[in-house]
Amino acid sequence: MTKNILVTGGAGYIGSHTALQLLQGGYNVVVVDNLVNSSEIALHRVKQLASDFSNNLSYIKADIRDKEALDKIFSSTKFDAVIHFAGLKAVGESVEKPLLYYNNNLTGTINLLEVMSDHGCKMLVFSSSATVYGWPKEVPCTEEFPLSAANPYGRTKYFIEEICRDVQRSDGEWKIILLRYFNPVGAHPSGDIGEDPLGIPNNLMPYVQQVAVGRRPHLTVYGTDYNTKDGTGVRDYIHVVDLADGHIAALNKLFDTDLGCEVYNLGTGKGTTVLEMVTAFEKASGKKIPLVMAGRRPGDAEVVYASTEKAKRELNWKAKYGIEEMCRDQWNWASKNPYGYNSANDEE
Ligand code: NAD
Ligand code: WQD
């Protein structure tokens, strides 16, 4: 029997790639998204890419804080599981507007868990983040590391993880997988879907991409005095298609095994510096990325990368792509869609 999966935040960057992998894997997908940080065009593209499976995708525009709307969605379809991406994710904005972040991410998730419980749907995959490791004392980060958070956004991830653990402890019918993503980059190899941040990008690769297409003059490199091979920060970049596949592996785990609330890192296990990433992107794109060297960005960790052992062992999943493919696919998306899902005229 075809399984029905509710994907909250499915119009967004990771959600749209995951929705496509789900469709291609034979699942029925219902996306709920309020489009606060995304475009419905992404879902039209997902439909096109899914070709024979396109009819298995539907979209409902709703805010997950709207409990009545959620209740209606669960009344009309019996879901086998929920993949919960919906949330706000800009670290700087979360410092400026903590209540917005607590309201959106926490209230939204609590509503969702309540409605799921009311309708007897008790299987959940949640988008957590490597941000819950803060500035790790050592690397690679294993799932047992102590948790910390350096900003309100990070705290929403930490609190939601704890809420999920409590909910599962209180009712053993729940099965929950918390996925801690490292640094998702790249795009679908078609170049038809990818990351399209609103305004000035916060993250490295969307910024590099906008420099490459001429939307920004240079990249500012935050910190050149870290204790790393070239002085710049080290992260574990993971291809978004690998990440999407990690969600299919998590669903298989939920459907096939007994489990309570488990947490898995999704990363490659490899660390790459900012300058290595820029060089790889220059090679993939043939574009020069002008750099301005600057001081450290407040709150940034020096070196963060994942231990991937647990996901390998228990989800039977590991990342297939390296930074070359990440940069190739990011550039393919950027060159086909220099203004993302909008046109140049929409730029403010
Ligand atoms: P994204 O902003 O592209 O996607 C999030 C989606 O959720 C957007 O489409 C947005 O419109 C929607 N949304 C937000 N609040 C909503 C609400 N109240 N109701 C309905 N829809 C709502 O972000 P992404 O990069 O695809 O991230 C997906 C999830 O993964 C987020 O929870 C994010 O915190 C987490 N995550 C992202 C990264 C990353 O670097 N991209 C890393 C770790 C974790
Ligand atoms: C990567 C490296 C920067 C931009 C953030 C969030 C985290 C998670 C992923 C969701 C760092 C450097 C960046 C730029 C730069 N998101 N950099 N110039 O910091 O690992 O994590 O996104 O959960 O919560 O904090 O990713 O892409 O911002 O930075 O030099 O313009 O690139 O200093 O070393 P980060 P990032």
Image (cartoon, grey):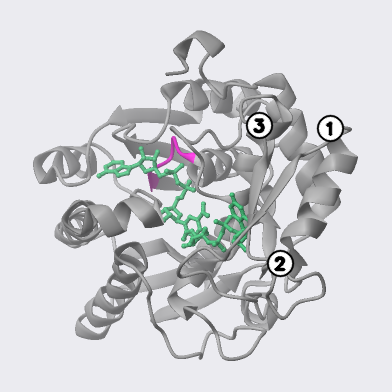
Q: Secondary structure at mark 1?
A: loop
* Number of numbered discs visible in the structure rendering: 3
The answer to whether 93 appears left or right of 193 in the picture is left
The answer to whether marks 3 and 1 mark residues whose Cβ atoms lie closer than 8 Å is: no
The residue under label 2 is 232
Q: Which residues are magenta?
A: 6-12
Q: Secondary structure at mark 3?
A: loop
Circle 1: residue type: Lys
Q: Position of residue 136 (x, y in %)?
A: 55, 85
**Image point (43%, 40%), residue name:** 10
Q: Residues within 10 Å of mark 2 (few under 14, many from 20)?
A: many
> Is the CB of the residue bearing disc 2 within 8 angstroms of ligand 2?
yes
**Image point (54%, 75%), residue name:** 264
* Cα distance in 3D space between marks 1 and 2: 21 Å
Circle 3: residue type: Pro
Q: Secondary structure at mark 2?
A: loop
The residue under label 3 is 217
Nearer-N-terminus badge (3/2): 3
Quadrant containing ligand 2: bottom right
Magenta segment includes 8 = yes
The residue under label 1 is 287
Nearer-N-terminus badge (3/1): 3
